[in-house]
Image (cartoon, rainbow, N blue to C red):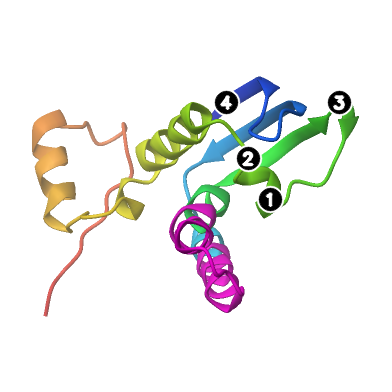
Amino acid sequence: MSKVIRFEGKDGSNREIRIVVVIHRATILDSIRRNELLGQGLKAKEKDPDRRIAHVAIWPVLLGAAEVQTFAVSGKKARFTFEDFISLPDIFVQKWMTSVYEENPHWSPGFRDDQETVEKKRSKPTASSSPSMEIRKP
């Protein structure tokens, strides 16, 4: 299952932008990509602590389970970069983050393994409604 979110308007640099993002349930390859982006963020020479947090904690999560299908500046397609990302309006980034966590709750800060059990009991899925998974602790 996937979710599409869009934004058209001015970014923090006062550029006219259009962005379309498809968010999906993460696979193991997406998790690896998220970790690679985290590693790149740790290696980045960010002096500003806020930019460092964005590069290490937010950018990898949002791009790990999403594909930027369209990014255009002033009507021209462009490559989506970290600089573009940190210029996006906060309300759009928050919507993107919420969507990623809805599709991938195990990526959200503070997620505990027992939350899955609680959710299963709450929703009582049928055998055909969702895949089953069991986590055993040693």
Tag 3 near tag 4, CB within 8 Å: no
Name the N-terminal-most of marks 3 and 2. 3
Residue 1 is at least partly visible in this image? no
The answer to which of 134 and 47 lies nearer the viewer is 47
Q: Which residue type carries mark 2?
A: Ser
- Give the residue number, with chain letter if any, for mark 4: 5
| Residue 99, x across and y down, in percent | 43, 34
Q: Which mark is residue 87?
A: 2
Where is residue 91? Give x, y as percent: 47, 27
**Residue marked by disc 1:** 83
Q: Which residue is nearer to you in this view: 52 or 132?
A: 52
In the picture shown, does residue 116 fall above or below 21? below
Q: Say which residue label 3 marks.
A: 74
Q: Residue at x 55, y 70 (%)?
A: 47
Among the two numbered marks 3 and 4 on one chain, the one whose residue lies closer to the N terminus: 4
Q: Which residues are magenta?
A: 32-59
**First reached walking from the N terminus: tag 4 or tag 1:** 4
Question: Measured along the vertical axis of the image, is residue 61 above or below residue 127?
Answer: below
Give the residue type that dot 3 points to: Ser
Give coordinates of residue 103: x percent, y percent.
40, 39
Specify the principal SS of the magenta part: helix
